[in-house]
Image: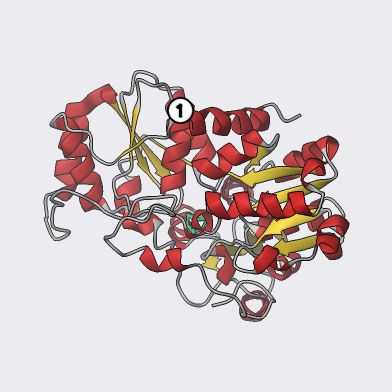
Amino acid sequence: MTTTSEPLDVQPTPLALLLLGRESDPRSERGVDCPGDLPAPSDPDLVERARAAKAKLGEKVFVLGHHYQRDEVIQFADVTGDSFKLARDAAARPEAEYIVFCGVHFMAESADILTSDAQQVVLPDLAAGCSMADMATAEQVAECWDVLTEAGVADVTVPVSYMNSSADIKAFTGRHGGTICTSSNAERALEWAFQQGEKVLFLPDQHLGRNTAVREMGFSPEDCIVYNPHKPNGGVTAEQLRDAKMILWRGHCSVHGRFSLESVEDVRARIPGVNVLVHPECKHEVVSAADHVGSTEYIIKALEAAPAGSSWAIGTELNLVRRLAKAHPDKQIVFLDKTVCFCSTMNRIDLPHLVWALESLADGKVVNRIQVDRETEHFAKLALERMLALP
Ligand code: SF4
């Protein structure tokens, strides 16, 4: 599967192959091992066990559920939302000693960064990483900064990192005067960054960076170049770096990256009058062909506001699309792609893992704690605070 129009002449990231592995990988933004005895998925008492453990913990536990989580997990969430909203919700519940994050590793890190030292963040399965976040490692980004320094452009470049990145990348961003962005505020973050410098290094999602710069801010596609960490010097020349306005990291979401122009054309032919609504992590050609583009929260609100009888094809994660179709039976809501596609790492958080995490906590044992070291936390927080202060 390719997610760009570039030829596939590069080494794919090896990290993605470790998603189902049991070995630890220090280069990954997540762990890949899950210790302990998990209940069997066939256990008919799982729902009751989750309820009982949660009731025993009471106010001490706060369960966060990302929109892309399975139904069997989301039913136990105290709050649902996107990663940034969830991290802030956890910080607003200081009485909750344990934050169980049903999402992926970088989200649990962000929650640890934004919550107090007295709160412990737990990820029910350590193998729940994010392939996009794994596409930018701290070593690769440090090397990129060296390349920019060599080309004489580092001083005028401001890093802007998408929320979907590891704590290390957020800390790099904070250290180098940059900010974090979400898919809702990427335009404001870029406007701010261009007031601080002449160029932006956008990490790690090339599509969100390109879509925001070209679609929202009027840059031309030629203003954007792609830095490929698997090629010497990123596969770009010093001259290209000097000419570019947007230096896009070659990363993408493996779920949103799979939607194609063909899927848009196909759904338009199948459902006359359909509204195509996609997430900005989709490829530029898909976003350009869509009727509406927006973050997960935008998608949810747009469907709430849509008139009865209207038809919608949604380009985002399937668990969410299915839930939205169920919640709005008066509208026709279909998944944009013909083949089903869940986020495989999000889906690793299942009911057995949640039961295991909750029961362990109820027994006084903290498992799978996600803890960001002090220095990384300090600089990552700096970048997050810059985002909060965006005009
Ligand atoms: S949907 Fe994409 S960006 Fe989100 S966790 Fe999955 S791979 Fe990462």
Residue 112 relative to residue 359: left or right: right
Give the structural element (helix, strand or loop) at label 1: helix
Q: Residues within 10 Å of mark 1 (few under 14, many from 20)?
A: few
Q: Residue at x 17, y 59 (%)?
A: 41
Report the front residue among 122 and 75: 122
The answer to whether residue 82 is seen in the rendering is: no
Q: Residue at x 76, y 29 (%)?
A: 391
Residue that carries the numbered disc 1 in the rendered image: 374
Q: Quadrant of residue 313?
A: bottom right
Q: Residue at x 73, y 70 (%)?
A: 285
Query: Horizontal and vertical percent for residue 197?
Result: 83, 40
In the displayed structure, would residue 253 be above or below residue 78?
A: below
Callout 1: CB less than 8 Å from ligand 1 = no
In the displayed structure, would residue 122 be above or below residue 364?
A: below
Residue type of the residue flagged with mark 1: Arg
Residue 82 relative to residue 267: left or right: left
- Quadrant where the N terminus sits is bottom right
The answer to whether residue 389 is seen in the rendering is: yes
Residue 80 relative to residue 234: left or right: left
Q: Quadrant of residue 388?
A: top right
Query: Horizontal and vertical percent for residue 219?
Result: 86, 56
Q: Quadrant of residue 95?
A: top left
